[in-house]
Amino acid sequence: MNQKAYITTPIYYVNDVPHIGHAYTTIIADTMARYYRLKGYDTFFLTGTDEHGQKIEEAAISRGRTPKEYADEISGKFKALWDEFEISYDKFIRTTDQEHKIGVQKAFSTMFNSGDIYKGEYEGHYCVSCETFFTDTQLIDENLCPDCGKETRIVKEESYFFKLSNYQEKLLKWYSDDEKCVLPKGKKSEVISFVKQGLRDLSITRTSFDWGVKLPDEINDPKHVMYVWLDALLNYITALGYGNDEKNMKYWPATIQLVGKDILRFHAIYWPAFLMSLGLPLPKHIAAHGWWTRNGEKMSKSKGNVVNPKEVADAYGLENFRYFMLREVPFGQDGDFSQKALIDRINSDLSNELGNLLNRIIGMSGKYSDFNISSKDVFDYHKKELTSVMEHIRLAETNLQDMQTNRYLEELWKALTIANQSITVYEPWVKMKEGDKEFAFATVAMVANILAKVSIVLHPVMPKTTQKIAKTLNFEISYDTYKKFIEDDSLLDDFKIEKIPPLFPKVEGELLNSPTPSVKEEIKKEEDSLITIDQFFQTKLKIGTILDATEVPKSKKLLKLRVDLGEEKPRQIVAGIKEFYSAESLLNTQVCVVANLKPAKIMGLVSEGMLLAAKDKEGLSLLRPQDSKKSGSSVG
């Protein structure tokens, strides 16, 4: 095998147990690895855990554990779940592995000796939760992390820096030259926009804690440990032996590196810059997926609505869960988990369209031909249907290679629809009564061949289910059969079908308890929402006159307003009303303004108040005084 594929998940941070987001990433990666193996590629699939950093050190200390003890426990939970989910990884890496540390130290030395790392001092706002520094302009309300919303700390310490600024133009050229280097395209545009704003050199060491990889001995600076993101990103090459036994470096560059959208910046900017510094080729695709909500709400422990992937898989079946995750949401967009949606997918897509098709083939072949099926006349009678099916299968594969997992499955189900509709249109039972047995037998065989071809290309998502189908149709799914039935578009040899129970029994109701607030919680929530008259009068509402209005670039909703509230100078207010009001229509009109809100930053613009408005299904209307009032007049 000359062609190689290298698939990676991000290494998961050991600050918490696996959740549905981790499962989603890993299932996609597993699907891609299985697909490339099916096509005969020499494939290497990597996953693992990220175990260093201040956040882990603090979490361990708070539990009376050493960082290594704490990391061992959580890392073990990830590995146990992936093993139970039969994830087909080739290596599970931990950043506490000695081979990883050696490789990271070699990379640091290489970048240092090439002049890309220098020593200096750093002062800035640091978010422990995100392990990231932010500039003043990036912060929310002057001190809050723009990514997680938690308070940042002012950190001033000696640091080694990576010359990220030197790679700005090289990165932009990479994005320009390689259309699919970052997927989907919308995420790539966000990365390009960020880089064009200007890259600053990156602080890559810390002295304020010890839990991390030490600098190489040749640097002779023992108080420093490496920044967790430098340490973590290098896992993708240390897992292949970089800095040690490098025989598996033959798999680099990576074919697909899967990440969540929250860590795309690290992977699409820092990581390729590090690789350029090391003189290594860049990944072929960095693919960023969205987040998951539950029943339309953001998941959180406090709400008790975090989806445990093991519980879902145990209740509904692992392969049903895998199918749902990949089919339900377009790659790159946020998805919503609900039991109703999962049950609909099982009952409609899997039971009615896939499982029932196999049942119909078994039933018709048993009734007409003693379960014997022959493909000898299929091309004569049904070449049009088979040609159309292969078009859908080719498109399905293209979509999968572009990470459009939902479209990949949609195309396969279009092929299944052709099979199911052919039974309805050609009515083999009628043909049998009319004495046209050849046509009836050919129709049943055509449908069996469609199911066989779909099963092969569906195999990466549902490996056990598709092997059951293949066994029933008397073949095995492998590279050889992929080549025979998909690449060469051959048909099944004559065979006797095996009768098996239905693959997807209908699900009649929800199998897991949905998170529902208790009566006490509802009462408390209602009580908490009530305010006193004194609290109401703490809100200052004033009449304002809009002096100027302009659209905010790159925003579909925001207008930037200059509003006179009778003060020494007008205020700037950013309002999300562009869908309902043009900038021109607001000039010299009056509005009601909440005047004592703490200023906030919206898309980098300071907003010094909020407009009052009413909204219903008909749209949004600003609240205005009936007659013109003096700017700054009180409301209430």
Image (spheres, rainbow, N blue to C red):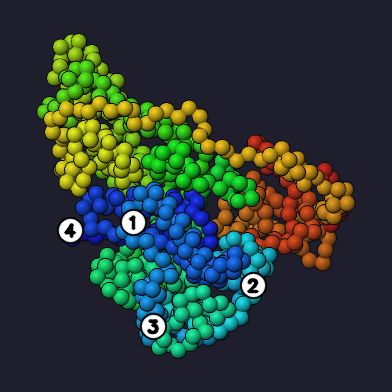
**Neighbour tally class for label 3: few under 14, some 14-19, many 20 plus, Cα within 10 Å:** some
Q: Position of residue 409 (x, y in %)?
A: 35, 41
Q: Nearer the viewer, residue 24 or 200?
A: 24
Badge nearest the viewer, 1 or 3 = 1
Label 1 and label 3: CA atoms lie apart by 30 Å
Residue positioned 45% across, 73% down in the render: 230
Label 4 and label 1: CA atoms lie apart by 19 Å
What amino acid type is highlighted by mark number 4?
Met
Q: Are marks 2 and 1 in contact (CB under 8 Å)?
A: no
Label located before the other in sequence (4 or 1): 4
Residue 89: numbered disc: 1
Residue 618: numbered disc: none
**Neighbour tally class for label 2: few under 14, some 14-19, many 20 plus, Cα within 10 Å:** some
**Does 425 appear above or below 338?**
above
What amino acid type is highlighted by mark number 1?
Tyr
Residue picked out by circle 3 = 109
Q: Position of residue 580 (x, y in %)?
A: 64, 45
What amino acid type is highlighted by mark number 2?
Arg
Q: Secondary structure at mark 2?
A: strand
Label 4 and label 3: CA atoms lie apart by 35 Å
Residue 202 can be seen in this image? no
Label 2 and label 1: CA atoms lie apart by 38 Å
Label 3 and label 2: CA atoms lie apart by 30 Å
Residue picked out by circle 2 = 153
Residue picked out by circle 4 = 1
Which quadrant would residue 65 be assigned to in this image? bottom right
Q: Position of residue 364 (x, y in %)?
A: 24, 20
**Neighbour tally class for label 4: few under 14, some 14-19, many 20 plus, Cα within 10 Å:** few
Q: Secondary structure at mark 3?
A: helix
Label 4 and label 2: CA atoms lie apart by 52 Å
